Amino acid sequence: MSEMKLFFDPETVALIGASANPLRPGYFLFKNLEICFKDKFYPVNPNLEQIEGKVCFKSILEVPARIDCAIIFIPAQSIPKALSQCAEKGIKAVIIESAGFSEVGSEGEALSQKCLEIARNAGMRLWGPNCMGMLNVPKLKILSFMNTAMWQGRLIPGKVSLVVQSGMLSAGFLMHILSKTPFGLSKVCSIGNKMDVDETDLLEYFLDDPETGVIGMYLESLKKGRKFFELARSTEKPIVVLKGGRSAFGQEAARSHTAALAQDDQILDSAFRQAKIIRVNEMTELMDVARCLAVAPIKIIPKARIAVLTFSGGAGVVAADEIFQRGMQIAKLKPETLSQIKTVFPEWMDPSNPVDLYPAMEKFGPIKSFSVSLSAVMADPGVDAVFVHLFAPPIDIPFFNFDAMAELIRKFEKPIIAWIIGHAETAAKMTQELEKRGIAVADEIGKAIRILSALTMRK
């Protein structure tokens, strides 16, 4: 674990393969490390004396400092020599971001084994190859060749740590997160071929990491499946996994991408369920579920009986269908719950679940009708969680009491998830206010119900 800490929180770093060409990934690595580590960063390039005024060293052996972590970005055939020099220097953590290893066939596999032999003889851990490295957001340590403009001024520290086996996919994740649906991140890891460090090493680290509250992973294979699932069963931290290669075609694509070995998907699916891992089926679902799990409280709810509050009967029908398809139930409300809701309904209408609040809203306004109904269903012992449909008006007027909603969550220890539709700017403000109070928000009914199933059925 001490070597793993050197990857995530190094004090000194060296870059073997620093570039002065602004069009090369080695230049972005140089810029990112210079920004984050300043005078504790040492670029290495035998063909350069300096880059933008910063001294370049001919070899890692010439660096006049102890190095916690070295990043290598040079042609694959040159890496064994660089690793031998890192071993001689006493470096214990090395990230290889170059490609050209197991994913290219037998020659690359032989090169991988040579690198592993050097590392193991030196007590060194290897991260990668064929990856984009790592971001530690709370400590602002960027050990990646991602474009500097992608992250500067955009990163939000939070509790979600991501592990992505694909390099460019991790960059795509980040761009989506930072530009479309901003949320707080702890660590972002691109692990590529997993020559040495793999998802199980990272999971073990994150379980003890106080800065990580939710773990999201895109994986094409599991190297140490038994230990991975044992670790997952041992924790209360939510783990969300998108497993690529579910089909024979996907498995073949994974082999050519990161040399991933095929695994029986049905067996994996059963193991995920037994280990309390939330399995998702596509990229945005992975991000949405991880984000909302970081926002909303987790509670053991074995039956997942859902109350639905909506301002549209049609939305209630769609929500009910989605709840059923996700293996949950529409809660049967107690007579006393229905009687309390009835106090804000017109005489000609009896409430049921889903609770269509529009007639009540016409009579008593949105704040009272919503507040009375939400309080009633949250207090109902037959309700495990609540899905609410909120309308975002085009003008800044109070429609809902967000503090009262948060107080109901604390009092009854039941999750609420909101679907907001209406004016985009108002919806964005409402989302911020709700998520500050532990209420997850989605922009689609199906997405909200999928997240709700993760919140309620994880155990």
Image (tube, helix red, strand yellow):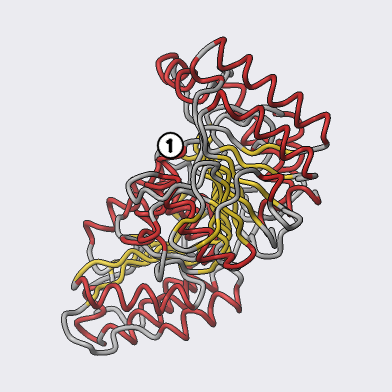
Q: Residue at x 31, y 60 (%)?
A: 180
Residue ranking furthest to the top: 106
Along the line of sight, which residue is nearer the eye, 132 or 403?
Answer: 132
Q: Residue at 48% of width from left, 51% of height from top?
A: 29
> In the shown orientation, is residue 96 left or right of residue 253?
right
Q: Whole-percent x and y of residue 34?
A: 52, 62
Q: Residue at x 42, y 75 (%)?
A: 434
Indicate whether 24 appears above or below 373.
above
Element at badge 1? loop
Q: Could you tell whether 69 is left or right of 380 in the image?
A: right
**Residue 347 location, quadrant:** bottom left
Q: Position of residue 264 (x, y in %)?
A: 58, 17
Amino acid under disc 1:
Asn
Q: Residue at coordinates 32% horizontally, 46% vertically from top-left?
A: 23
Q: Residues within 10 Å of mark 1 (few under 14, many from 20)?
A: few
- Residue assigned mark 1: 281
Query: What is the x, y in percent for residue 94?
Result: 67, 42
Q: Relative to 390, say whether 406 is above or below.
A: below
Task: Classify residue 161 by image quadrant.
Answer: bottom right
- Between 443 and 351, the residue placed more toward the observer is 443
Q: Nearer the viewer, residue 126 or 184?
A: 126
* Residue 416 drawn above or below residue 146: below
Q: On the picture, is 437 further left or further right than 362? A: right
Question: 181 or 169: nearer the eye?
Answer: 169
Q: Whole-percent x and y of residue 77?
A: 56, 23
- Left-right relation of 261 to 61: left
Numbered circles on residues, count: 1
Q: Residue furthest left?
A: 394
- Residue 245 appears in view: yes
**Residue 279 visible in the snapshot:** no
